[in-house]
Amino acid sequence: MESFFAIGLIIGKLAVVIAILLVLPIPLTWIERKIAGHIQQRLGPMRVGWHGLLQPLADGIKLLTKEDHIPTEADRFLFTLAPIIALVPPFLVFVAIPIGDSVTIFGTEITLYLADMNVGLLYILAVAGIEVYGVIFAGWASNSKYAVLGSLRTCAQMISYEIPMGFSVIGVVMLAHSMSLLDIVEAQAGLWNVVYQPLGFFVFFVAGLAEAQRIPFDLPEAEGDLCAGYHTEYSGIRFSFFMISEYLIVVFLSALIVLLFFGGWHGILIPLPPVVWFLLKLSFFIWVFMWLRFTFPRYRYDQLMSIGWKVLLPLSLANILISGIFML
């Protein structure tokens, strides 16, 4: 009986996580438009509903009813597969993302995560890297010069930021003596890792901007010179898959920054529930990602590659060396 209850609990938590992740991009699109409006001294969405609150619903209806167009010369199999490949990894990484330790509801202890993997951090970085294949396939399958250029830029920037991104978290693993995200958070109960690892945080955050394909590193899209980049030829629900994936990656990276460098659900001074602390930190970094998008100009992809190899990689290696020296 207990095994059936445990299985039911896992299925229930899985259903809740999937439902939240599917719905989350809807308010985020509205929030991002409002943030953009205030940064640029305008109102943002105002016409559809009070302060434009129904605008995401109108966008959803439009995407669901819009014609699903596939170019005549496109590779139909890869064209159809690409949005799915782009969408699935952001869901898979949340299997190992904890938002708290555990809570007791009606006498039953419920853990606020789906799985505590002893190599959770390695699993997350590996699975998150698969998402780029969806971008590459989308550009190649579209048989469009603009889309292919977007895919090539994805390949160029991927090899530039992935290595520093992986190296930047080694210092955190060294401090926690574990790749489990729960152990990493517990190791920050006294002092957050950003105090010990400011260099690692900087490298991870900059590489995260490239991972999320957000300005100043949104080179695969680059609306100013590639129309819409790798998904130029996509419309309707297939296009929405790429947008959902983009927002979920922002949420995932914000959660990972909080877990690795800012104490997870551990708070300071103000006695708030651990989950509230985690959500407040998560919301702050989501806002930072959106703020940067409407503040900085776009880099050229050769500049991003130069930053990755000549700046981020040496800094990440220096961070590992400094961490080892101080631990000794």
Image (cartoon, rainbow, N blue to C red):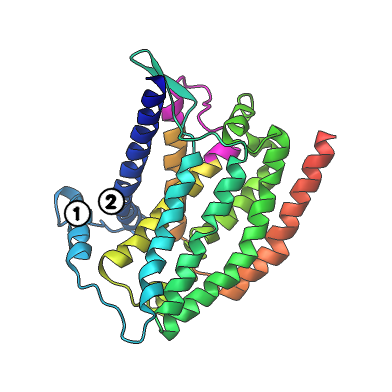
Q: Residue at x 62, y 36 (%)?
A: 118
Q: Quadrant of residue 138?
A: bottom left
Q: Residue at x 34, y 54 (%)?
A: 32
Dot 2, crowdedness within 10 Å: few (<14), some or many (≥20)? some
Magenta: predominant secondary structure element? loop
SS at circle 2: helix
Which residues are the magenta region? 258-277
Q: Where does residue 304 sit, x and y in percent of width and height?
A: 60, 68
Determine if the magenta segment contains residue 175: no
Q: Where does residue 217 sit, x and y in percent of width and height?
A: 52, 65
Residue under pointer 2: 26
Q: Disc 1 and disc 2: Cα gap in Å?
A: 8 Å
Residue under pointer 1: 57
> Can you name the residue that lies furthest to the top here?
107
The reply to whether residue 262 is visible in this rendering is no
- In front: 1, or 185? 1
Q: Where does residue 177 sit, x and y in percent of width and height?
A: 71, 34
Q: Quadrant of the C terminus?
A: top right
